[in-house]
Image (cartoon, grey):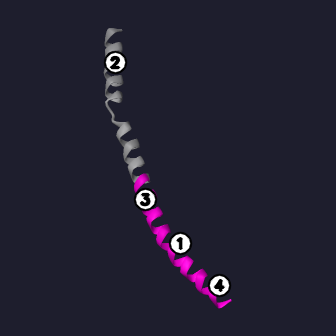
Amino acid sequence: MNNLFLAMYVKMQNLMKHEEGQDLIEYALVAALIAVATIASMQKVASAMNIIFSQVATTL
């Protein structure tokens, strides 16, 4: 019976050693990088669209 508890204890310790929190941080950093890249590209797109709409408004 003690061997069974010892085996279960060792398995639980091995399961707890996995670093799953690290994955969450990596995903958060990737999401932040994507957000920054999206914001930077949207500013350039918005600027180009503003020029186009200004030209259309001038033409009309």
- At mark 2, the secondary structure is helix
- At mark 3, the secondary structure is helix
* SS majority, magenta: helix
- At mark 4, the secondary structure is helix
Q: Which is closer to the viewer, label 2 or label 4?
A: 4
Q: Amino acid at mark 1?
A: Ala
User: Does the residue at mark 1 contact the one at mark 4 (Cβ under 8 Å)?
Assistant: no
Label 3 – label 4 distance at C-alpha: 31 Å
Is residue 17 highlighted in magenta? no
Q: Which mark is residue 9?
A: 2
Q: Amino acid at mark 4?
A: Ala
Answer few, some or many: residues within 10 Å of disc 3's Cα (few below 14, many 20 plus, some between 14 and 19): few
Q: Which residue is mark 1?
A: 46
Q: In x, y percent, where is residue 47? A: 51, 74
Q: Quadrant of residue 58?
A: bottom right
- Farthest front residue in view: 58
Q: Which residue is mark 4?
A: 57
Which circle's residue, 2 or 4, is located before the other in the chain?
2
Which circle's residue, 3 or 1, is located before the other in the chain?
3
Which quarter of the rendering shows the N terminus?
A: top left
Q: Which residue is mark 3?
A: 36
Q: Amino acid at mark 2?
A: Tyr
Answer few, some or many: residues within 10 Å of disc 1's Cα (few below 14, many 20 plus, some between 14 and 19): few
Which circle's residue, 1 or 4, is located before the other in the chain?
1
Horizontal side of residue 17 vs 53, given as left or right: left
